[in-house]
Image (spheres, grey):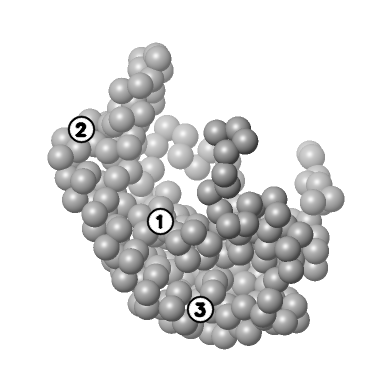
Amino acid sequence: MHGGPSRFPPALTSALVAPVGALRIGVCEKSPAGGPAAEREQIDALHRTADALADLGHHVELVQPGYPNVSASFSIQVAAGVAEEADRAEHPEFLEPRTRELAGIGHRLHRFAGWAERQGIEAGAKFNEEYFGAHDLLLTPTTPTPAVPIGQLSGAGLVSALRKATPLAAFTSIWNVLGNPAAAVPAGFSEDGLPLSVQLVGPLGGEPRLVQVAAQLEQVQPWAQSRPEIS
């Protein structure tokens, strides 16, 4: 609501200019979903960013968090969410076949959506107590690979599309279930000139701190003036 109180103390815009004290930041290479390991360029970008955070005065250490298995909760929530959005489509006849197929699955699984949400909340409370009780932030890769060529899912059926897309979301999907805020921060470029990224994850309600640290990284690892070559 315009003019109403901020959801966060402080507001996100204020966080951009607020001083940041030394934070406890854990760095983890492994996939929360047990998927494929991140490729070398992603890992190199991760550790370059960890070094930059240490140079900024933060206490940085390698960690191995006890990630919960939320694959069932995530799959049910995604399918149910697609079904809800498909029902709202003004022109459902334009939906791709695999979207309609996933929506059909979501309708059948809708009765489990409440269970999936409760499982995520419970798992999130446990993870936040265990990990963020001792750390302020978590640093991970954002994806296991640099950007993939456009059109990877064009014409693919549902099973084929899920098989290709699921590993790419292995580092990010867990936070959709647990409810933790996360920020994908640019972290240089691959040997092919593609942008690389790392992910900062905060505790519940930790958006202001994420904004602060992301702004710090942008100052020491600037990227906004970079432009891709256009063939």
Mark 3–mark 2 contact, CB under 8 Å? Answer: no
Residue 123 visible: yes
Where is 13 relative to 25, above or below? above
- From the viewer's perspective, is the residue at label 3 or at label 2 nearer? 3
User: In the rendering, at what x and y percent does residue 206 appear?
Assistant: 53, 62
Q: Looking at numbered disc 3 in the image, what kind of residue is underneath it?
A: His
First-in-chain label (1 vs 2): 2
The residue carrying mark 3 is 135
Query: In the displayed structure, does residue 166 sit left or right of residue 191?
Result: left
Q: Nearer the viewer, residue 122 or 144?
A: 122
User: In the rendering, at what x and y percent does residue 90 appear?
Assistant: 40, 15
Kindly state the secondary structure of the residue where label 1 is placed: loop
| Gap in angstroms between the C-alphas marked 3 and 2 | 39 Å
Q: Residue at x 62, y 57 (%)?
A: 10
Label 3, residues with CA under 10 Å away: few <14, some 14-19, many ≥20: some
Query: In the displayed structure, does residue 203 sit left or right of residue 178?
Result: right
Kindly state the secondary structure of the residue where label 2 is placed: helix
> Which label belongs to residue 107?
2
Q: Quadrant of the N terminus?
A: top right
Q: Residue at x 42, y 32 (%)?
A: 155
Kindly state the secondary structure of the residue where label 3 is placed: loop
Q: Looking at numbered disc 1 in the image, what kind of residue is underneath it?
A: Gly
The residue carrying mark 1 is 179
| Gap in angstroms between the C-alphas marked 1 and 2 | 23 Å
